[in-house]
Amino acid sequence: MLKFSFCGVLIALLGVWALAQAPVEITVWWHTGQVAELEVITALVEEFNASQNEIRVRLVNIPEAEYTAQVRAAGLAGKLPDLLDLDGPTMANFVWNGWLIPLDPYVSDELRADLLPSIIAQGTYPPDGKLYAIGMVDSGLAIWGNRNYLERAGVRIPAGVDDAWTLNEFEDALKKLAALPEVEWPLDLKLGYGIGEWYTYGFSPIIQAFGGDLINRTTWRAQGTLDGIASVLGMTLFQHWIKEGWVVPASAGDDAFYGKKTAALAWVGHWMYGPHSQGLGEDLVLIPMPKLGAGCRAATGMGTWCWGITSTSKHPEAAWKFLEYLLKPENILRFVAANGAVPGRKSAIAQSELYGPDGKLRVFAEQLLTIAVPRPVHPAYPVITSAFAEAVQNIMAGADVYEELHKAAIKIDQDIEENAGYPPFGG
Amino acid sequence: MHVIKRNTQIWEELAAWCFLGPAVVLLLVFVVAPFVMSVILSFTNHRLVSPLPTKFIGFTNYSRLFQDVSFWQAFKNTGLFAAIVVPMQSGLALLLALLVNRRFSGIYFFRGIYFMPVVIPMVVVSVVWYFLLMYPEGLLNAVVRVISLGKAGPYDWLRSPSLALPTIILVSIWQGVGFQMTVYLAGLQNIPHELYEAARIDGASAWQQFLHITLPGLRNTHIFVLVTTTILAFKLFTQVEVLTQGGPLGTTNTLVRYIYVVGYRELRVGYASAASVIFIVIVLVISLIQRLLLREEREVT
């Protein structure tokens, strides 16, 4: 009898101990685009799970094309995971819907000071000034060049952001490069990516260099800004490059610059580092964005996929522990090795071979600290980007620049009006 | 006797409902309910996701739609697409069916070849054509160059406002024609051989046989092919989304794609619902007209 009850107590105690020890399970969503990125994330999850007993991370992969739609559906149904990765500019809309929680209580001063300013800019929600998303990396947009062609055409290769090409130099370079026998089109603008986020990410810096923008960021109205003289000037220039026959046509395939080598320059982001360095080797140079604007201004894009903790998560602390693990400089660097992106922490940049003082991609980091402009952090962003991308597509095909930008501006303002100005914005 | 008859009647009715039941439930849930919902939503400012409450805004969505140039362009493109594709695809399908409705060795090979594109998913077909249509070095441009002895081309099939829609039409017909061919083939094989024998004895030429036996014999097949091809033509979406994304200058945008972009990319469900209500009304009117015309034909028989 005594023996029996002793056993019972032991079992009960064991049960309590097991309960206390049972790991907290958190679900993490990841958009699967590039295989190399997925491999690193999967490995990091496995290593994190193996390194401790309190938290078990369950990674769910969702294809990139449908990812944002899936998040919205889950948000509607109240079935969001604990931690999810999201494309930078969609954050504002998610916060507005109340799906994300501020990360400020978790972020140490040391970490905050170490994050790239661009990561904080893109992750901060203007109405309350709080940080809702942190990226392991940031993106870089500049011009990749073929050194062999540039030297033979006698074009100066700028060393850094300060001595970037002016508009005249840039167009002069395009003319000279077009004259080379191997070059069919001097510039690849990746028009073949098709209508979508690339058009906004890649080409809104042109209007920003002239002082224009997608939307006025204090009044949150597009009319007068997106269809203003500065923006019209910028997109007219873009159309001019296409009309001159300097730009690789959308249907010519992806590899004009790095495969067939019929293009001399490629205006595209960090994500092409892999194919570009394989295709061009030592001939690959990275050139900062040209100073297109009247006051000799240049602009570039920023922002990429980042992490946010959801408001429905029962274990936000556990989610943060895993995010903190991802944000360790050594883990950021493993991720950078897979996709060539700019490390999101200054300490990681200092250790990076690609981004350090003599790194091949140093220009990206330099640009992020000087001339990068975040895409509007506003809940109307889905409409802003869709309207602008449609305008870009039509301008590409030869439509009237003002008409197209005006149409896009009206569409954006109409949407904001329909949503009562997206309170607390505009209030 | 009377009672028994009544009993069987009840059983027959019950059986009929049992057979009908699943279909009726599915139709109610997946066709009628969404339609009623989109009519209701079309009078609101409903968003796909939003913390703000949905408000009734009367006919605002409709009055905006009537001023929306992109909507009417998509409408015009869809109509043009259907007007060209329906007769061309049906005609070509009949021609192919006549060709493969013969007895010689290897005929199954040809039937299979023509039918193959139908089995391949449209997305795959579109991606393959994307490569064939590349500019300036795609296969199609190479063919054009060889045939024209280097005088014509290269053409940017998908990015030139005058070529993009014809190219989409070509790809669509190539992919879909095998299906209608099979339907016509079945129709052809239902025509009694005696009719042709009798005609030959009477000294009718092949053309006369086609005109007076084959064509009338295919009347019901024509009806089926016409109706299905029209509906498929109005549903045009996949090839456009993959090949041109509605461009250039909106010359290949279609109603379904317009509704998709407004509703899912821009989250404006209320506005997209208004567009789909108009779309449904258009398709309904066309189907009614077709039915009226075809019913008359049936009465003749």
Image (tube, rainbow, N blue to C red):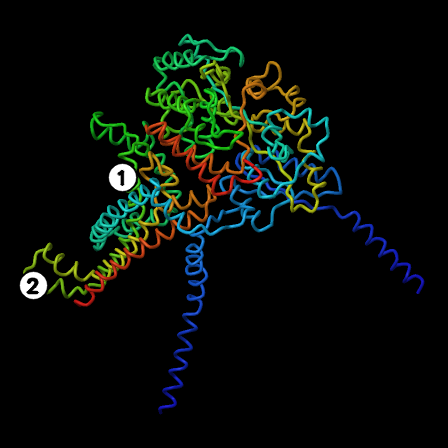
Residue marked by disc 2: B201
Query: How far, Cα to Cα, is label 1 from label 2?
Result: 45 Å
Residue A269 location (% of width, % of height):
50, 25
Residue at x 57% of width, y 41% of height? A94
B172 or B227: nearer the eye? B227
Tell me: A347 left or right of B207: right
Q: Quadrant of the C terminus of chain B?
A: bottom left
Residue marked by disc 1: B166
| Looking at the image, residue B256 lies above or below residue B243 | below
Q: Secondary structure at mark 2?
A: helix
Residue at x 56% of width, y 40% of height? A423
Residue A61 location (% of width, % of height):
57, 42
Which image quadrant is residue A363 in? top right
| Looking at the image, residue A149 lies above or below residue B79 | above
Q: Name the amino acid type tagged 1.
A: Pro
Residue B274 location (% of width, % of height):
39, 50
A121 or A148: nearer the eye? A121
Q: How many numbered discs sit on the rendered protein?
A: 2
Q: Which chain does the numbered disc 1 sit on?
A: B
Q: Are marks 1 and 2 on the same chain?
A: yes
Which image quadrant is residue A306 in? top right
Q: Secondary structure at mark 1?
A: helix
Q: Name the amino acid type tagged 2.
A: Ile
Q: Badge 1: how crowded within 10 Å, few (<14), some, or many (20+)?
A: some
Which residue, as the protein is rendered here, is positioned at the far front? A427
Q: Quadrant of the N terminus of chain B?
A: bottom left
B34 or A218: nearer the eye? A218
Residue A179 location (% of width, % of height):
34, 13
Q: Which chain does the numbered disc 2 sit on?
A: B
Which image quadrant is residue A153 in? top left
Q: Are marks 1 and 2 in contact (CB under 8 Å)?
A: no
